[in-house]
Image (cartoon, rainbow, N blue to C red):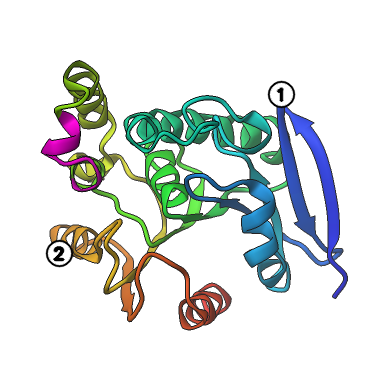
Amino acid sequence: MKTIIHKRTIKGIKTLEYSSKKADKLLFLQHGIHSQKEKVMHLLGVSFVKLGYHVVAIDAAKHGARIEEPFLSKDEDLCELETMYVVKQTSEDIKNIYEDTFRSEFDGFDFIGVSMGGLIGYYLSTITDQIDQLVALISSPKFLEAAQYTFPEARQKKYPEQTKTTHAFIESIDPSTRPESMVFNRLIMLNGTYDRVIPSSQSETFLDENPQRNIIFRCYETGHKIVQKMHKDLLAYLKNK
């Protein structure tokens, strides 16, 4: 199957799209922190095209072609404090791109996000009712818990006022505190057992708290990275829905 690569600008945002003549469903594929659309598409895009998807990737806010501080200089403390603002903005961008360009052709879409990209998917599910399958790879639906894990008290002391403001903002958008606002037909959470960036326990707890939802949760013997078995299982889940 030949992959057709298309680039364009929608709502002022550059897209990278992989597709084929047989594509009959839509997928947004979102990268993680300090990455960009080309990297995640090169890693995973073609495999989803083979499943019949028209795959769309954009750079997250302040990343890639949209690069801005603090992600330009990669100050880790400031990047952590800014991450959830990036999550909210990028989620809104994807919603707008879908409604502007793709809604007339595709009645809903699937979403796959890696790490920060998974956070984007979780928040996106609270602002649109168009997600069919939501896939979060090495990510967490518990925003405040995830943020506090990566930005502990020792780091908070360096930026007390900014930490306080960011804490309040994260509380206001944390989807795990209002799971009834998350709209999807199926959620797939694939995590690493040894992940020291986003612990798998956060996803597992969310599963336990929401037993009535259609959720698949699985862990793999890895840290904060996608492994071949994880990718293979994901393709099987998507193919056999």
Q: Is residue 88 magenta?
A: no
> Which is nearer the N-term, disc 1 or disc 2?
1
In the rendered image, residue 169, in percent from the top left (x then y), is placed at 26, 24
Q: Which of these two is toward me, 4 or 53?
A: 4
Determine the residue positioned at 44% across, 40% down. Answer: 124
Is 36 in front, or is 110?
36
Which element is circle 2 on? Answer: helix
The residue lying toward the viewer, choosing from 158 and 152, is 158
Residue for badge 2: 208
Magenta stretch: dominant SS?
Answer: helix
Residue 194 has which mark?
Answer: none
Tell me the element at label 1.
Answer: loop
Q: Position of residue 74 (x, y in %)?
A: 47, 36
Q: Please, what is the three-letter code of the amino acid marked with disc 2?
A: Asp
Q: Quadrant of residue 75?
A: top left
- Considering only vertical position in the picture, is 70 above or below 185? above
Q: Could you say which is closer to the camera, residue 103 or residue 157? A: 157
Q: Is residue 94 above or below residue 196?
A: above
Residue named by callout 1: 12
Q: Quadrant of residue 41?
A: bottom right
Mark 1–mark 2 Cα distance, whole angstroms, equals 40 Å
The amino acid type of the residue labelled 1 equals: Gly
Residue 26 visible in the shown view: no
Residue, x 39% and y 34% (percent of image)?
79
Boundaries of the magenta span: 149-156
Report crowding for label 2: few under 14, some 14 to 19, many 20 or more residues within 10 A (C-alpha).
Answer: few
Q: Position of residue 89 (x, y in %)?
A: 48, 28
